[in-house]
């Protein structure tokens, strides 16, 4: 929930933090083609995937950026919501809770995974996204080339953590 303003500032997303609860999340109708095409091509039938996760959800996600959100069958699975008398987590309008979102940025994409417990399905989504996003066929690199790429990535990661985005981008582009 706290990450949304940073994502807005860095990547120009319209996303806002919404809620924190466990439910079943499903692929959104409008994203099935994107999910099965560019984002997660290594996961069979990813457009039909439904999984349970406790997540920090987003709202304000445009339809083309939604990957997994609440469905008509979503029910709250958190005890706090049950105690409050909330059972349905189903969408109540056009803008509904989303736990996985993506946005094209530059020559690539960013991916938001709101799962707080690293559920197996979320880990598979993260792995598939990274594998599909790889621009460099690492198996073709010599050990020296792989060492230079790994060092540049580490420098980029450190610059990103320090908030020095221009240095991070320079290292990632090496």
Image: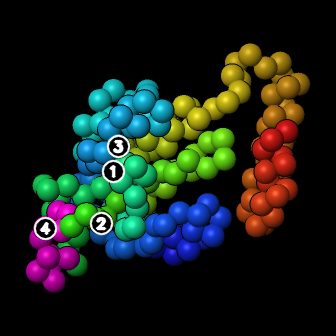
* Residue annotated with mark 1: 68
The stretch in magenta equals 81-92
Pointer 2 or 3: first along the chain: 3
Number of numbered labels in the structure image: 4
Q: Earlier in the sequence, mark 2 or mark 1?
A: 1
- Quarter in which the C terminus is drawn: top right
Please, which colouring scheme is shown? rainbow
- How far apart marks 2 and 1 lie (CA) works out to 13 Å
Q: Nearer the viewer, mark 2 or mark 1?
A: 2
Q: Is residue 56 visible?
A: no
Residue sitting at x 51%, y 75% = 2
User: Mark 2 to mark 3: distance in Å?
Assistant: 15 Å
Dot 2: within a 10 Å radius of its alpha carbon, few (fewer than 14), some, or many (20 or more) residues? few
Question: Residue 70 placed where, x, y %?
Answer: 24, 58
Mark 4 vs mark 1, CA separation in Å: 17 Å
Query: Which residue in the structure is indicated by mark 3?
Result: 31
**Name of the residue lying farthest toward the top:** 140
Which residue is at a point 67% across and 30% down the rendered structure image? 135
Q: Are marks 4 and 2 in contact (CB under 8 Å)?
A: no
Give whichever of 83, 13 is nearer the camera. Answer: 13
Q: CA distance from mark 4 to mark 2?
A: 16 Å
Q: CA distance from mark 3 to mark 4?
A: 23 Å
Residue 119 % position (x, y)? 38, 50
Q: Which residue is mark 4?
A: 88
Query: In the displayed structure, would residue 53 be above or below residue 45?
Result: below
Numbered disc 1: secondary structure: strand
Mark 4 vs 1, N-terminal side? 1
């Amino acid at each position: 929930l706290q990450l949304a303003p940073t994502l807005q500032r860095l990547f120009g997303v319209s996303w806002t933090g919404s809620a924190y609860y466990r439910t079943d999340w499903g692929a959104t109708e409008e994203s099935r083609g994107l999910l099965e095409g560019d984002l997660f091509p290594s996961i069979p039938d990813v457009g039909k995937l439904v999984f349970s996760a406790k997540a920090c959800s987003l709202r304000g996600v445009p339809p083309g950026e939604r990957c997994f959100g609440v469905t008509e069958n979503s029910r709250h699975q958190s005890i706090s919501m049950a105690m409050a008398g909330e059972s349905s987590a189903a969408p109540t309008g056009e803008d509904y809770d989303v736990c996985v979102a993506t946005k094209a940025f530059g020559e690539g994409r960013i991916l938001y995974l709101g799962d707080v417990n690293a559920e197996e399905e979320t880990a598979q989504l993260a792995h598939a996204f990274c594998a599909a996003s790889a621009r460099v066929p690492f198996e073709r690199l010599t050990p020296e080339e792989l060492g230079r790429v790994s060092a540049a990535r580490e420098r980029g990661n450190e610059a990103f953590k320090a908030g020095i985005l221009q240095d991070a981008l320079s290292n990632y582009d090496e």
